[in-house]
Amino acid sequence: MTTNVGGLDRVLRIVVGLALIVMAAMGTIGAWGYIGVVPLATAALGTCPAYTLLGFSTCPVKTNAG
């Protein structure tokens, strides 16, 4: 798979994923909060299937400097 999740995007996915999981574990938002595993997984893998389908990427573009 091609990497399509950039640095800031990864950090935000980690923060949101952890927040959802913590709130679910505390009983604040219910069991659906464990969906926070999805943003954590996409951040860890560096690829997002939805971005692939939409042809979107937050990674910096690599150019040939030669």
Image (spheres, rainbow, N blue to C red):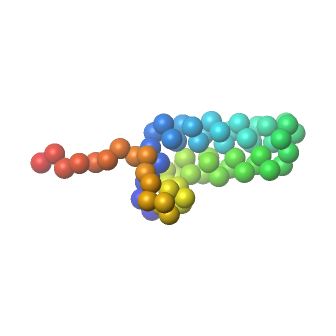
Which image quadrant for residue 55? bottom left
Q: Is residue 25 visible?
A: no
Q: Is residue 21 visible?
A: yes
Q: Is residue 9 left or right of residue 40?
A: left
Q: Residue at x 84, y 49 (%)?
A: 31
Q: Position of residue 42 (x, y in %)?
A: 56, 51
- Image quadrant holding the N terminus, namely bottom left
Q: Residue at x 77, y 46 (%)?
A: 33
Number of marks drawn = 0
Q: Residue at x 54, y 60 (%)?
A: 49
Q: Is residue 4 left or right of residue 22?
A: left
Q: Is residue 62 left or right of residue 65?
A: right
Q: Position of residue 41 (x, y in %)?
A: 60, 51
Which image quadrant for residue 30? top right
Q: Position of residue 22 (x, y in %)?
A: 76, 37
Q: Is residue 59 left or right of residue 9?
A: left
Q: Residue at x 35, y 44 (%)?
A: 60
Q: Position of residue 61 (x, y in %)?
A: 31, 47
